[in-house]
Image (cartoon, coloured by chain):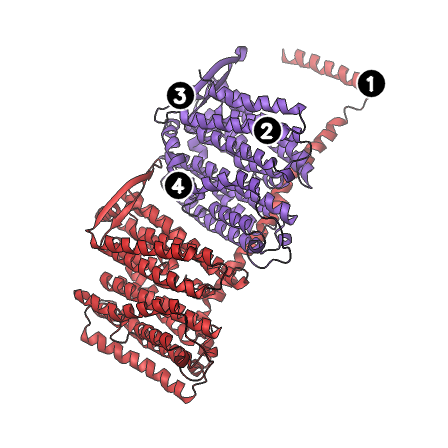
Chain colours: A purple, B red
Amino acid sequence: MSVLPVLLLAVPLIGCLAVLGMRRAAVLVGVLTTGITFAIAVAIAFAVDYTRPGTHLVTDAPWIPPLGIRFHLGVDGVSVPLVVLTALLCFLSMIYVARREGTPERPHSFVSLVLLTEVGMLGTFTALDLLLFFVFFEVVLVPMYALIAGWGGAGRGPAARQFILYTLLGSGVLLVGLLVIYGHTSTLDMVELAGRDGAGMSRAVQVIAFVLVAGGLAVKVPMWPLHTWLPDAHSEAPTVGSVLLAGVLLKMGTYGLVRIAVPVLPEGALAVAPFLGAFGVIGIVYAALACLAQRDLKRLIAFSSVGHMGFVLLGIATLTPAGMNAALFANIAHGLITGLLFFLAGGMAERFGSTDMDRIGGGTLAVTPRLSVLLIIAAVASFGLPGLAGFWGEMLAMLAAFDPAAGLNRPLYLVFMVVAGLGALLTAAYFLVMLRRVVQGTSPRRQGVLDVTPVEYLAWAPLVVLVFVVGLWPGLVLVPTVDAVRFYLGGL
Amino acid sequence: MTAPLVILGTAISAVCAVVLALLEPFETYAVLTPTGTIPITMGLRVDELSSTVAVMVTLVALAIQIYSVGYMRHDVRYPAFAILVALFTLAMLTVVLSADLLVLYVGWEIMGVCSYFLIGHHWEKPSASAAAVKSFLMTRFGDVGFLFGIFVLGGAAGSFRITDVIAAVPAMSPGTLLTGSLLLLAGIIGKSAQFPLHSWLPDAMAGPAPVSALIHAATMVAAGAYVVALLYPVFLAAPLSLDVLAVIAVVSMIGSALAALVTDDLKRVLAYSTISQLSVMFAALAVGGRTQAIAHLLSHAAFKALLFLCAGAVIIAVGSNLMADMGGLRRGMPLSFLTMTVGFAALAGIPPTAGFFSKDAVVAAAEHAPHWFVFGGLLLTVGLTAAYTTRAWLRTFFGSGPDAGEASKIMTIPLTLLASAALLLGFVGLRFEELRPEVLSAVLSLVLAALGALAVFMIWRRDPARDPADALGRARRVFGSAFGTDDLYERTVARGVVRVANEVVRVDDSVVARSVRGTGRGARALGGLLRLTQNGNPQFYVTALLAGVVVIAVGVVVLQ
């Protein structure tokens, strides 16, 4: 019985309720709450002994006894990096909101919704009961819908509706899949299910359950061709919403695949994995091409997420330890880099009045050099320059595809690898074209546009630093995951 | 503040490189990260090849850093420039000294991005930013293959450490070796700007002259030849890949020499000559002359850095890149004239410069090889090189032209040092058996060089104001466009990708997204249909209820 995971959820939940009655102090309380939550997350990261297999810091109490649903929380090497990332991004978002010029209307509801989102996200990454996982998974949707619909851009209404309806549909499918698992195993305990390696379920059941679970999660990832909610939602959401959507929400899908779908349903995974891989690499190339023709900076970043998640899917689809590590690493890297990119796009929008690349008009290096240099760093990291965070995950995913798990069709995966490699080239192409249109060239007007402010530095610097640290020392993320991942692939 | 720091830093690393060169070969490494499969290690691998090249890299970088202080004096972007040059040097040293292929790849790519930033130094100019993007994407295209080549070799050896990979070569299957070496070649051709991935290099002239010196002499392009020498056992075990390399080298060396013959931009002439000289190194590697290739790599580094820095001095003095705007500069810029003459002589292979010795060693190696076409190609290139070198020399320093003053001292000191290296380095190589000149090849290439130079001189003397290349007539345009390769890429690859991208956005909007929205409309229509039953008419409800009861009753009776 450990108190840390409970605290991790309780603190933002208390904060979420407490700010409802405030006005002025709401943002300050928000910063404090997320700060404390981040401190707890870091404490969890240090409290876990990664060399010991299994879950750590477990809390297990009956919740709905007649149905056998338990309030079962815990962490391991797979979830800790995501927990820390979530807490960090929420904290930085709050700092960003705390700027004088950045405080939204109705700050108390805004902060409350962000904190509720944080509860849901952290819960998703710490839940060890299938139904509890599902509940947290759903908790995230409503406040995020409200954030987009209440504080978003011009097209926020349809974007928010599409977001919630599409993802709810995915959740419905996911729930059916989870119930199929429960129906055949009579347990909702994720640890126990993973330890059984699919015993008690025939191959057909596993395939059906896998298709349902993975299909539901794939909407959230999002996997091509289920991605259409994403560009609209990401580009219409307020800056903080985009950061959390891209930085954390997408990872809930891939985390579910690594944590539930593959270990619980190994035979199903073996049958369906090639499709996941195929959709993943199609997504990489498709998103890159779509980005090449994009005119809006925020939409471009949003579409780039589809490509990056394609690499994550490819890693998972190899069903090898290397592939899973690649997926988890790419998750973290994408959270850091794309979170930063959305922050910077928000900064661009505030200064130049638009995220349309033609309206920004180029030459920002001359007008706001610091902001532009940060954008260059983030873009270069995002296309996977070695030595920065984006590289290792994508490289490892391709390496894993070079040598996929036994039982998978190797020539097919070699094709995936080559397509992914060309997709990485196209990814570099659209980011460089973007930099050429936004950062380079001559600026049409504007002197005296404010460069990066101290508070913005405070919110962005940790991400920039981590992009370098994780890029130069990938072991920081990979050492915890490597041991944990072995356990999940026992059934293969 | 930046200048003393970067110079001091580069000097310290040069001293360290010299120390490494004096030590016995050694290797040291530690695990950088586990991956779930083959772990990635980080470490130093010092042997004769790597330490020698490291010394060359740091010394040339030092000369360039010192020179840049003068060259970039009035440039507000100097600090960023100097730091990127330092990062570039660091990346090249990573390639040279890394013990692990994947860490080598990290350095390999960081070099690519540094060249992107430096070529795009004048980022307000569209031509510069376009050239930067082109250079990065073209080399990265090859690098995709390079990475897969590392996968193939590392996977077969069970380790990414260079020592392990080389040790495992005898146990690898011929197919693995051929695939691995050909994939590596893709990246090497891209980085070293060989045909068909050559066209980024002439455009890369958009960067300042010291950048060109760095890219063309000490780093980047040299990395390609270095990696072949580093992994030479892999290539030797896959002879077909060396044959491919030979063909590429011969095509590139002649094609780029012809392009250099007609180009009017002084830096572009030097750029084409770089492609050609790298092909000479690859030709040596293709015929088994590893030592000769490295010797030429080192002497080329000295004289090409010298040539680019001289060209920078000349360009600053004249204010133009075009040789048409130059001429007669030997009077106003005696020191630049003298040092650049040494550089041109080395490029043309005139004794006693380093270029003569190293190129002659390559020609001699090709003479003993079974491929006659490598030998023939090399001899032809020797003649063409002398021709375009003479043309550039005459048009820059002779005839009539603008008045220009000598460059500042901080620029001429590195020139003098590099010129002495280009003059004397050849004699150092005489310690090695393979590098001593052979009579037949030396005489043959000297005669051809003299013929080429003489031909250009005769044409030039008729009318010093005219470009000797005009004598080529219509062929000039063909050579000048590098046989239209760039135009071809522009028309097929670049436009093709853009067209497909636009198509994808259209499809994404119309088909994929519409089907989603269509689902929404479908649901609403279905709801509308069901709404018809909820019409609020009590008679309808009662009738429906009775009908339902009847249906159930009948059903019960029938099914029993």
* Between marks 1 and 4 in the image, the one whose residue lies nearer the viewer: 4
Q: Which circle's residue, 4 or 3, is located before the other in the chain?
A: 3
- The amino acid at mark 3 is Arg
Percent position (x, y) of residue A238? 63, 38
Do the residues at discs 1 and 4 belong to one chain?
Answer: no
Residue type indicated by callout 2: Gly
Sequence order check, earlier mark of 2 and 3: 2
Q: Are marks 2 and 1 in contact (CB under 8 Å)?
A: no
From what the image shows, is residue A98 above or below residue B138? Answer: above
SS at badge 1: helix
> What is the x, y in percent for residue A132?
53, 20
**Residues at marks 2 and 4 touching, judged by CB atoms closer than 8 Å:** no
Left or right: B288 with respect to A208? Answer: left
Where does label 2 land, which residue? Answer: A30
Q: Which chain is home to disc 4?
A: A
User: To which residue does mark 4 refer?
Assistant: A396
Question: Separation of disc 1 and disc 4 at Cα?
Answer: 68 Å
